[in-house]
Image (spheres, rainbow, N blue to C red):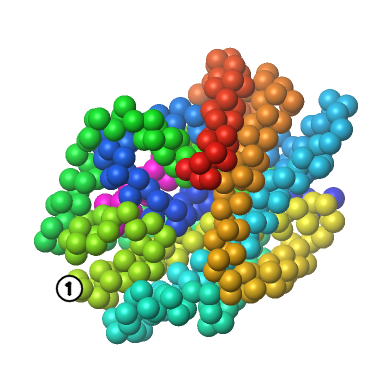
Amino acid sequence: MQDRESWGSQIGFILASVGSAVGLGNVWMFPWRLGKFGGAAFLIPYLLFAFGICWVGLMGEFALGRSQQRGPISAYEKIFGEKELKGGKILGFIPIIAACGIFTFIPIVTGWVIKYFALILTGKMLSIEPSAYFGSFGGSTSSILWTFIAFAICLYIILGGIKQGIEKVNKIMIPTLFAMLIILIFYTIRLPGAGDGLKYLFIPNWAMLFQPITWIMALGQAFSSASLGGCGMVVYGSYLRKQNDIPNSALNALTFDTIAAVLAAMIIIPAVFAFKLDPAAGPPLLFITVPTIIKAMPGGRLFGILFFAAMAFAAITSFVAITEVLVEALMDRLNLDRKKSTLIIGIIGFVIAVPLSLNMNFFGTFIDVISIYITPIAAVLSGIVFFWIYGGKKALDEINQGAKKPLGTWLIPYAKYVFIGVSIIIVTIGIINKGM
């Protein structure tokens, strides 16, 4: 067995975790949910779930990985073996299946973002009709090149390893991403009509707090934003050292992820209102609505360059995190080195992504199956394995290992019943409603 890599610093680990969590969903999901479901009032259930529920789940995934120094397959296998239980290895494949599913479509979307960054960088975006262009680009053979470029960037980072690859890149990309978001806010809030967008976002509609749909949407958004799924955060946690502070790391990761989501909302929604577009456009927001805004606004090209650079950073860091899950699985299970594992995963992933990128109907259905069913089930499974099968007392000891402010025994029943209970509710609601 090869020596286990580790993070060079706690801040590097936190930034990598933020990079995993801050994805494109923060751009096209959080802003319209914030506005539609109560504005500032929506933040109450969202923050309650993020820091009251997801924090526990995130600590659990970090600690599960660190305690076993392995990804989910070997971690589950070892824990089940210690309890003389069967089926650990099989169950450990469920988070890997979820990761495989995400891995097949995230490079496609990442490629789209890189393509749009190239469009605005060269100025070509200013001469296209956004809706028609995306209709001709998405699902066409011309998107394959950009999927390849996304793979090339991701694999280059992964080949650098944990310290010199993933950690080093996140230390550059994540602070830069936040800097660009802040600059973009000062740009958009000065647009005529942007004030209506800020009102839409932040004037609380307290009546929405009495609507169950608000709490359901806040619950789903919190779990999605935290990147809980029993795979990426478990693998990142497996590279932690015993002196790393898990409660503090999880808290910081959630805090910065939330800040990124709010900043994105303060950029997108005021601009949408300024140009009288649809604030609830959903997925088309990034590739149709934003380019429409860029074409119409003064200084739109500079805005677009900063915006799509930020989105590229968000997409790439998330892509890297999910790829590392699969690379780690090959290194662990087949005892391959990082280079061989990375190349194998990259080649297989690209071969699968090509036909998927050419069939937009299947593409959408595939994303739904992964995000609605498999990933939430994997998140629940991770919590059950760590807090129930591994054991509440042992789980608490692992979480507190290296913590400057150790948590009390209250965490054991809270994690076993509240966190896992809420997780099961999320899975059930997601299946019934076919998504949040």
Q: Residue 225, percent across and down?
A: 47, 45
Which residue is rendered at x = 24% and y = 30% of the image?
Answer: 206
Which residue is rendered at x = 58% and y = 78% of the image?
Answer: 144
Q: Residue 133, percent across and down?
A: 39, 79
> Residue at the front extreme?
432
Is 82 positioned to the left or the right of 123 in the image? right
Which residue is rendered at x = 72% and y = 65% of the image?
Answer: 345
Image: 213 above or below 435: above
What secondary structure characterizes most of the magenta part? helix
**Residue 114 appears in the figure:** yes
Q: Residue 317, percent across and down?
A: 52, 59
Is 231 positioned to the left or the right of 307 in the image? right
Q: Which residue is mark 1?
A: 298
Q: Which amino acid, by three-letter code, is at mark 1?
A: Pro
Is 217 positioned to the left or the right of 17 in the image? left
Which residue is rendered at x = 76% and y = 42% of the image?
Answer: 92
Name the residue nearer the viewer: 159 or 118. 118
Name the residue nearer the viewer: 83 or 144. 144
Q: Secondary structure at mark 1?
A: loop
> Residue at the left extreme?
192
Name the residue nearer the viewer: 104 or 238. 104
Residue 101 found in image quarter: bottom right
Crowding near the residue tagged with mark 1, few <14, some 14–19, many ≥20 C-alpha atoms within 10 Å: few
Residue 115 found in image quarter: bottom left
**Residue 47 appears in the figure:** no
- In the image, the segment drawn in magenta is 254-268
Residue 50 found in image quarter: top left
Question: Can residue 267 be found in the magenta stretch?
Answer: yes
Q: Residue 299, percent across and down?
A: 20, 74
Question: Can residue 24 be found in the magenta stretch?
Answer: no
Q: How many marks?
A: 1
